[in-house]
Image (cartoon, rainbow, N blue to C red):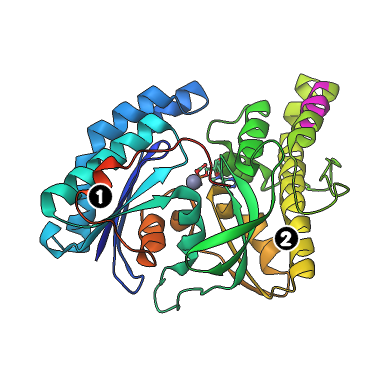
Amino acid sequence: MILAIETSCDDTCAAVVTADGEVRSNVISSQGIHDAYGGVVPEIASRHHLERCTAVVDDALRRAGVTLDGIERIAVTQGPGLVGALLVGLCHAKALAAVRGLPLTPVDHLQGHVAANFLRIGDREPFAPPFLCLIASGGHTFLAHVADHDGFTVLGRTLDDAAGEAFDKGARLLGLPFPGGPHLQRAAQDGDPGAFAFPTAAKVAGLDLSFSGLKTALLYAVRDLGEEEARRRHADLAASYQHAIVETLAVRVERALRETGATRLAIGGGVAANGPLRERLSALGVAVNVPPVELCTDNAAMIAAAALHRPGLPVGAHLALDAYPTGTL
Ligand code: KG4
Ligand code: ZN
């Protein structure tokens, strides 16, 4: 059994996963405090991780019905993310591994999002490579070819904002709380996705994506409508904006499926929790794996999943590991 810890952003996460990918526990402690600032405050995130990490790990063990005696390996997110936040989880993991004499596997957060698809959900078999994978989160958005359990090749990525960032910034323009994605999805429920023709960067060739023009288009639409009319058309604005993000992603996925001949698609990252995106991609006519929402947003079970297929570093060798803040892409 693997005990995994993930603290790359504002969620303190720990999970216990068995060697064949069964999730025994998946504890996620969210730091609601950042909502008041409209975004994650790195220093506050680190302090909260420090306060909660021990309790979250204990909770994950208790819910899995094991003690540290039953754990054979520790896995932890090494990067990318907020470096102070990452260091809390990494130091905690190193200390546990050193004290218990256990091997430790450092995991890349993005590989974790991809690996969420390797987990066994109920009696559903893990989704095995090869497949095309769309990862869309608050910090990253890319399309990758996943040839095996050990890595991936990026086919296209966002040239500016991540899809989750586009959701968050759009939600902010519409006066919705942070994080904006789920709020915007709810606000869009009774709106007309065709009411406003927001850009989808469909003309940008290749598999890269862009969201900055879309955000500006929403800003101008709200400004041109005026405060009162924008309030009256709130649901239409939200639905049209969401539709444009979903189309931007879906058009690239369709293009990538055509170009690579892939017949299997997996998705991950916080934005994969979005209902309309899940529906749109599920209708593409290929086998689509959509992990449950709690495995799409940040969690430690996906970090354990990535560690399942790679060796742990022996005691001592892992003490020199350092967190890395920016991407491996
Ligand atoms: O993967 P994640 O939990 O954290 C990062 O690694 O970034 O992703 C968080 C992002 C946020 O931008 C949030 O607004 C977005 O995922 N998100 C959603 C939904 N749920 C979360 N976006 C659209 N619709 C949702 N239902
Ligand atoms: Zn993430």
**Quadrant in the picture for residue 55:** top left
Left or right of 185, for residue 205: right
- Residue behind mark 1: 317
Write the residue at 71% across / 45% down.
242
> What is the number of callouts on the image?
2
Q: Which amino acid type is shown beneath numbered disc 2?
A: Val
Percent x, y of residue 114: 52, 59
Question: Between marks 1 and 2, how big is the CA–CA gap?
Answer: 40 Å
Depth check: give the residue in front, 97 or 6: 97
Q: Which residue corresponds to the image point at 64% horizontal and 31% vertical from the top-left?
A: 169
Q: Which numbered tag is attached to residue 253?
A: 2
Specify whether tag 1 is near ligand 2 (CB below 8 Å): no
Secondary structure state at the residue bearing disc 1: helix
Amino acid type assigned to the residue bearing label 1 in the image: Ala
Where is residue 184 shown, x and y percent of the image? 63, 40
Q: Closer to the N terminus: mark 1 or mark 2?
A: 2
Q: Mainly helix, strand or loop, the magenta region?
A: helix
Residue 22 at what x, y percent from top left? 34, 70
Q: Closer to the camera, 76 or 210?
A: 76
Q: Which mark is residue 51?
A: none
- Asked if the stretch drawn in magenta spans residue 219, the answer is yes
Q: Which residues are magenta?
A: 218-223
- Crowd around label 1: few <14 · some 14–19 · many ≥20 (10 Å): few
Please report the residue visible at 19 percent of the width from the left and 53 percent of the height from the top. 315
